[in-house]
Image (spheres, helix red, strand yellow):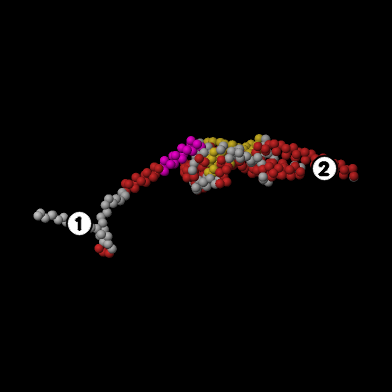
Amino acid sequence: MQAHKQCPPRQEQRASSGNNFTAAPVLNQTFPKQGAVSMSQELMKSQEKSQELSVIEQVVMQGDLSKLNPEQRVIYYNKVCESCGLNPFTTPFSYINLNGKLTLYAKKDATEQLRQIRGISIVSIETQLMDDLYIVKAYAETKDGRKDASTGAVTLGALKGEARANAIMKAETKAKRRVTLSISGMGWVDESEIESIPNAKCVDVDIRTGEIRGETVQIAHSQSVRAKISKEQAEELKIIVDECDPKYKAWFYERLKESFNSENISDFPLELFEKMKAAAVKNMNAHFEKQRAEYEKQGETVAVGE
């Protein structure tokens, strides 16, 4: 009888505690190589670049920043600042709803930084008073010799004293900022021009997160928001109404409160400004004539009594 050939005993791996433990060999264990890490980083950079280009493409095609998600708005804001050489932490731009689209407008920080970064100097200013318009023309020049000019204008109307002085200074500010943006090759709307643009509304957007805050979502999507009169127009109308007959003045503010739910004359609709101003001027002149007649009558009475 043939004896079977015995195979070597099968070794078994047993897990035990203590010093008798023998670790099983680890198969197919791999470690990341330096080249793989570098490729991963390059891939991430490529994806970020692709996302940035996608954001810019959407803005160019649609022209409406409200169509972007919050993260994309942050990317776009930072890219705009980067392309202009501006510091985004100083918030040189803010958001505005213009013609139904959310876009950026330049603030004071933007024009001041641009003048410093690009060596822009305001070389001269010309002023002109035409009827009730105060016009300022500002001339600018860059350090490489390029020149440009822009105009800023405000309505003085019946403004007097400090209100008139503020309006004159505002016209100069407008001219300087507009020429700075123009010579820099930027088509942004300046902060000083917003209140004179019909239906333009500032929109509250968190610059850090890109979120449109609740109270401004309605403004950003509403097409029926009434434009209000400017600060200068409000001051002009107030001066006129204050000189009107007391009964007319009381009626004016009652109507403002009842019709527009406000006691602030700045909330008066722009579309009714000229009509209301003409009515107020008419009442003011009639009130002056009445007072003059009363003074003359009192003078005649005194003369007869003497």
For label 1, the residue is 10
Q: Please provide percent x and percent y for residue 232.
A: 65, 41
User: Contact, CB < 8 Å: mark 2 with mark 1?
Assistant: no
- Mark 2: few/some/many CA within 10 Å (<14, 14-19, 20+): few
* Left or right of residue 254: residue 36: left
Q: Position of residue 26 (x, y in %)?
A: 27, 54
Q: What is the magenta segment's predominant secondary structure?
A: helix
Q: Of discs 2 and 1, which sits in the foreground?
A: 1
**Label whose residue precedes the other's in the sequence (2 or 1):** 1
In the rendered image, residue 57 lying in the magenta stretch gets the answer: yes
The quadrant in which the C terminus is found is top right
Front residue of 20/232: it is 20
Is 201 situated left or right of 36 in this image?
Answer: right
Q: Amino acid at mark 1?
A: Arg
Instruction: Say the numbered circle drawn on residue 295.
Output: 2
Residue sitting at 39 percent across and 44 percent down?
45
Mark 1, other Cα within 10 Å: few <14 / some 14–19 / many ≥20: few
In this orientation, which residue lies closer to the viewer: 90 or 306? 90
Q: Is residue 15 left or right of residue 247?
A: left
Q: Is residue 130 above or below residue 108?
A: above
Q: Residue furthest right?
A: 305
The dot on residue 60 is none
Q: CA distance from mark 2 to mark 1?
A: 130 Å
| Boundaries of the magenta span | 48-63
The residue depicted at 26 percent of the width and 56 percent of the height is 24
Residue 55 is covered by the magenta coloring: yes
Helix, strand or loop status at disc 2:
helix
Q: Amino acid at mark 2?
A: Tyr
The image quarter containing residue 126 is: top right
Give the x, y percent position of residue 224: 61, 39
Residue 69 shows in the view: yes
Residue 1 percent coordinates (x, y): 9, 55
